Image: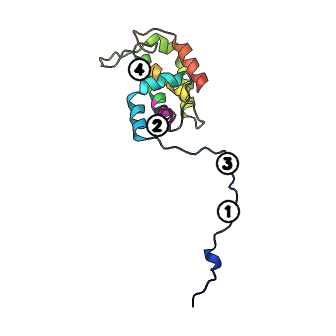
């Protein structure tokens, strides 16, 4: 004979309403978004520098995550400190690098050091400020470099405020 009784272990528990939390769910970016973020880094930095939104999983979100990573923060701080050190040096070296605007850098030495300290601090930084710094360093025609134009103190101050 068969037993028609069910074991209590096999009876499903009654369904209850699940509590909805406000915590964001991490969305892993597709390989395409990650490749686009790498290829179009300059264009994405320009958008981030003016405060463009970063939808989860998009190329711009991938770029924003990269810019705010600890390794990128330390790399930008190192680059800025190297610029100060090289600008203060009396030794002229022949190099393939774009020559620095020594006068501009010397005038902004304290501001550059404040930015470097902020980048090494454990507090989070914004993608907007990091994008501004990345663009400043990567723009060979900008005020950080000898043939560049613009207000280095103004651009550094805006980047520090955005951090």
**Mark pair 3, 1: CA separation:** 18 Å
Of the numbered discs 3 and 1, the one sitting upstream in the chain is 1
Q: Between 93 and 59, which is closer to the camera in this rendering?
A: 59
Query: Which contiguous range is marked in magenta?
Result: 60-75
Tell me what residue is drawn at x 49 percent, y 29 percent.
77
Callouts 2 and 3 close, C-beta under 8 Å: no
- Which-is-in-front pick, marks 2 and 1? 1
Of the numbered discs 1 and 4, the one sitting upstream in the chain is 1
- Which-is-in-front pick, marks 3 and 1? 1
Callouts 4 and 2 close, C-beta under 8 Å: no
Quickly name the residue at label 1.
15
Q: Decide: is 74 above or below 115.
A: below
Quickly name the residue at label 2.
71
Q: Decide: is 8 above or below 55.
A: below
Callouts 1 and 4 close, C-beta under 8 Å: no
Under circle 3, the secondary element is: loop
| Residue 104 x, y percent position in the rendering | 48, 12
Local crowd size for mark 2, using a 10 Å CA cut-off: few (<14), some (14–19), many (≥20): few
Under circle 4, the secondary element is: helix
**Mark pair 1, 4: CA separation:** 67 Å
Q: Is residue 142 found left or right of 127 in the rendered image?
A: left
Membership of 62 in magenta stretch: yes
Q: Kindly report the secondary structure that dominates the magenta region of the rendered protein.
A: helix
- Which-is-in-front pick, marks 2 and 3? 3
Question: Of the numbered discs in the image, which one, if any, rests on residue 21?
Answer: 3
Quickly name the residue at label 4.
86
Under circle 2, the secondary element is: helix
Of the numbered discs 2 and 1, the one sitting upstream in the chain is 1
| Residue 128 x, y percent position in the rendering | 55, 26
């Amino acid at each position: 004979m068969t037993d028609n009784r069910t074991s209590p272990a096999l009876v499903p528990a009654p369904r209850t309403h699940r509590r909805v939390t406000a915590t964001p769910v991490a969305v892993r970016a597709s390989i395409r978004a990650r490749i686009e973020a790498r290829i179009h880094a300059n264009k994405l930095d320009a958008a981030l520098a003016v405060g463009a939104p970063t939808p989860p999983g998009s190329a711009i979100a991938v770029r924003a995550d990269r810019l705010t990573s600890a390794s990128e923060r330390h790399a930008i701080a190192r680059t800025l400190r190297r610029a100060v050190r090289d600008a203060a040096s009396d030794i002229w070296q022949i190099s393939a690098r774009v020559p620095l605007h020594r006068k501009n850098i010397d005038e902004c030495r304290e501001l550059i050091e404040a930015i470097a300290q902020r980048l090494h601090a454990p507090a989070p930084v914004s993608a907007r400020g990091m994008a501004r710094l990345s663009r400043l360093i990567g723009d060979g025609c900008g005020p950080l470099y000898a043939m560049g134009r613009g207000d280095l103190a103004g651009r550094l101050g805006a980047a520090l405020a955005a951090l």
